[in-house]
Amino acid sequence: MRSRFSATLGVALSLLALPAAVQAQSASLGDFPAQSVERQALDRIVAVVNQGAIMDSELEARLAQVRGQLAGRGIQAPGEAALREQVLERMIVEEIQLQRAEEANLSVDETELNRAVRSVAQSNGMGLEQFADALEADGLSLAQVREDIRRELLLRELVQREVASRITISEREVDRFLEQQGEAGDVRYRLGHILVALPQSPSSDRVQAAQREVRRLAEELAGGADFAALAAAHSDGGQALEGGDLGWRAAGELPSLFVDVVPGLAVGEVSEPLRSPSGFHLVKLVERQGGQGMAAEAQRQQARERLFQRKVNEEIETWLQEIRGQAFVDVRL
């Protein structure tokens, strides 16, 4: 959707993609006007993903939406070739997840979907009818957006099944967390992130190439380059097309890799390159809030929630790399 809508469902709906309508296979060419036939004939496959395919028309629709999002956030868009690669890669990973959800017979209940659609409308300060009118004014439809939200809910259910369900938090972990956090437990950080990814079991040449790339990016940032623009153009992280924005994280929700680094950064400062199994990271402290103590009776439950979210965040990136590596993908840009 256009950037004037802040679509949130409790988990970020980072993109509400609007793929072109798929024509019914049984329809004859005579059922379409000549212009529609020409557009259909010009469409082509840009990626084969297992038994599925992503069409050029779908990619173009997503590109238009991403350009609008970047412009709305004041982020300079990458070059056209880089942007197409970034967006297509995101679509490929989404397609793999949707296929896995279908294989697992996951579905979204209509009541849950209706509740989520109303929540998006309310988050934009509108009732459902107003929301539908606003979408129509932007050339969209409520039916399209319902399907986009259905997809996001399905992906959330898949993550719950394949990632979050494996995570447990022990009482000992809670105790240790509270001891480590101390007075810092109430601090919140807004972070920017750039990832130069590595595959599983990378060769030494691949590791060295990634090291050179992350150092080059660090040097550009030290020379005054815009962090969000570099993230959009070069990061392999899931938030690349949001300028690498990780949003606000409580101290206890920081990825383990960042725990010892972020508190020592000044606002606006970028870390040195950090190594993890998924690759090399640059993290920027955009803003900092808090530092006041909280009610003692709430600390333990909050600690549990933060530990759980930290583990989920750490596992998702690895899981996405795993399922991407297991899939058959043929890119045809």
Image (cartoon, helix red, strand yellow):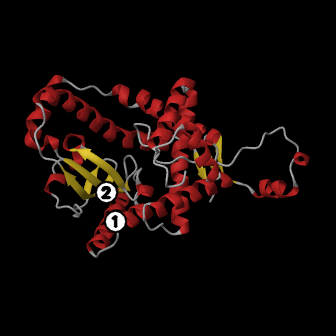
Checking the image for residue 15, the label placed there is none
Q: In the rendering, at what x and y percent does residue 80 appear? A: 55, 67
Q: Is residue 87 above or below residue 309?
A: below
| Residue sitting nearer the eye, 326 or 70 | 70
* SS category of the residue bearing label 2: strand
Q: Are marks 2 and 1 in contact (CB under 8 Å)?
A: yes
In the image, taking residue 303 as reference, residue 97 lies left or right, namely: right
Residue 318 shows in this picture: yes
Measuring from the top left, give residue 26's x and y in whole percent.
84, 37
Residue under the image location 53 percent in, 35 percent down: 117
Kind of residue sitting beneath label 2: Gly
Residue 33: image location, x then y, percent: 87, 53
In the drawing, does residue 76 fall left or right of residue 17? left
Please name the residue that numbered disc 1 is placed on: 227
Picture quadrant where residue 229 is located: bottom left
**For residue 205, side relative to residue 87 (left or right):** left
Distance from the alpha carbon under mark 2 to that under mark 1: 8 Å
Residue ID for mark 2: 192
Q: Residue at x 59, y 39 (%)?
A: 129
Of pointers 2 and 1, the one earlier in the residue sequence: 2
Query: What's the residue type where badge 1 is placed?
Result: Phe
Q: Give the image quarter of residue 333.
A: bottom right
Total numbered labels placed on residues in the image: 2
What residue do we see at 46% from left, 29% from top?
A: 157
* Residue 18 appears in view: no
Say which residue appears at 65% left-offset and 45% top-offset: 53
Question: Residue 320 at what x, y percent from top left?
Answer: 43, 42
- Asked if 208 appears above or below 331 in the picture, the reply is below
**Badge 1: how crowded within 10 Å, few (<14), some, or many (20+)?**
many
Q: Give SS at disc 1.
A: helix
* In front of the other: 69 or 54: 69
